[in-house]
Image (spheres, rainbow, N blue to C red):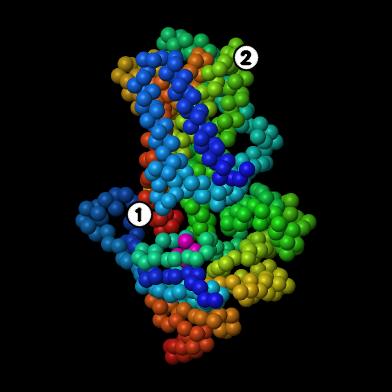
Amino acid sequence: MNFSSKITLAFYGIIAYLLGITVYQVLRDPGAWSFVLLGVAVLICFWLVGSKLISKKKQTILSRIQATFHRFSFLIEQLVARDFKTKYKRSVLGVFWSFLNPLLMMAVQYFVFIRLMNLRNSIGSENPMLNYYAVYLLVGIIIFGGFNDCCNQALRSIVYNASLITKVYVPKIIYPTTKVFSAGINLALSILPLYIIALINGLVPNFSILVLPLGLLFILVFTIGMGYFLSATVVFFRDIEFLWGVFSTMWMYATPIIYDIGFLPNTIQKLMFFNPLYHYIDFVRYIVILRQVPTAEETLICAAFSLGMFVLGLTVFKKTEDKFIFYI
Amino acid sequence: MEQDMIRVENISMHFRLMNDRISSIKEMMTALARRKVKFKEFHALEDVSFTVNRGDVIGIIGHNGAGKSTLLKIISGIMKPSKGRIWRGANIVPMLELGSGFDYDLSGHENIYLNGAILGYSKEFLQSKYNEIVEYSELEPFIHTPLRNYSSGMLMRLAFSIATVVEPEILIVDEVLAVGDERFQEKSKKRMMELMSGGTTVLFVSHNIDQIREMCNRVVWLDHGKVRMIGAADEVCDAYREQFLEQ
């Protein structure tokens, strides 16, 4: 099987997967029709990308993506492998750190907030998820940590590769993309310790785990968009590197990772709607702790944030990439 | 069989240089308010046009800052010109560049694949040429050692061996590269000459007029970003030398 047919297969596989979830949502709750209709509209757009109906130069958008991927797949593979290999190259435990790191982080925070400060009773609401606080905390740490890691890597991808960009022609978009991929592998790996902790807490996964890849896909797409946006803007304003450090810390505390949303005043609870990471973390918690498929509405909100961020990031990147070379 | 390989059509390249070094946001704001930020336009290239045919070996000459390297960067796709168009007959136009993207924590073996991928080689190509690269670099005993333990001479030898294993349709060379100790320098110089005389299309920047005269069939003379003269190698080289002597 050649490379482009693999991509085609993966593409239609994703569409089939999304369709399956849509059908499930309708069967479960016929009241969610309006949302599901919207979802179907998104799917049709997706399908159009691969069809010949909207195409430039007798090529579908999918086949153009294929051509680029085909030409640079070896480079992408090499860059991702490099990041992954060098990250743990000189440590004793190596790749095991991908599992260990989130667990240790969770242990520290659990100890500080529950044992030391005894926040268990004041931390939240009636939310049944809080009965499994360790798992609750771990999901938040893994998702936000993964997101933050990806963004930090992508942020520097253009500026730190300046010597390459000024000497060799490679589509610049490859740099932030591979950084997000290689940091994303770590995020995916840390799902394993998450499920170990969940099992210890008696949360045996059921069929709802099938929707977990969808949640991770949403997060990946959102993060790639964010990575494009950050890596492009930081070329023109280096201050963003420092601002982002402050901003991401603010974002972390503004996201219900340690506490529950019920802990907040009503007005701020409403504002939380605009925090994409709240939706993503909640999406995954729903699957892992409540072991249910998130509602159609919640799924669609996540999808909208992902698509929106991706389009914004890609637009900013594509509009500015020709000017990078004068600023790096 | 004459066939166009590269067409450079009316290419101009303008850089904006900021007049005063503005070092803080506050200064920038006040300067903007007073409309004092002037951008000095620097014209690195102006209205450059020429065509490269298949099999041509084109020399590009000119004084320092005449725009030679900028022209090569535009042709290889690293920069987009401010004005004008460029048409390439071959898919990728790599510039011969040593050691781009070496990772010092990885071994020589891993870096051959990484650097090769950055230079645009395919996996199959690298696999088939791997032994040749290692042999040519004379680094066989150290190939699984991390690059941070290499000496600078060893690094350059590895870089050179990877970069010159290509058989490209178009070769872009910014000065002939000669690396390593005296013996390896001879060896690498020979390899470069082989590459350039093997019937490939070559664009070649050099300050060595004798080398240009020897290697090239046509020469482009750039003077302050403009084409001063295009023509047969001997003709342009004579004119260039004459002007040089006059100064």
Residue in view at x 61 percent, y 74 percent: B199
Mark 1 falls within which chain? B
In the rendered view, tell whether residue A212 sits above or below residue B202. above
Does mark 1 fall on the same chain as mark 2? no
* Mark 2 surroundings: few (<14), some (14-19) or many (≥20) residues within 10 A: few
Q: Are marks 2 and 1 in contact (CB under 8 Å)?
A: no
* Prevailing secondary structure class for the magenta stretch in the rendered image: helix
Q: CA distance from mark 2 to mark 1?
A: 57 Å
Question: At label 1, which amino acid type do we have?
Answer: Ser
- Where is residue B51? Give x, y as percent: 45, 74
Residue in view at x 45 percent, y 26 percent: A280
How many numbered discs, if any?
2
Q: Magenta stretch?
A: B73-77
Let me know if residue A73 appears in the view: yes
Q: Secondary structure at mark 2?
A: helix
- Where is residue A222? Give x, y as percent: 44, 34
In the rendered view, tell whether residue B246 sits above or below residue A29. below
A139 displayed left or right of A304 = right
B27 or B50, nearer to the observer: B50
Question: Which mark identifies residue B23?
Answer: 1
The residue labelled by disc 2 is A200
In the rendered view, tell whether residue A227 sits above or below residue A98. below
Residue in view at x 59 percent, y 45 percent: A3
Residue in view at x 40 percent, y 47 percent: A55
- Where is residue B221? Give x, y as percent: 45, 80
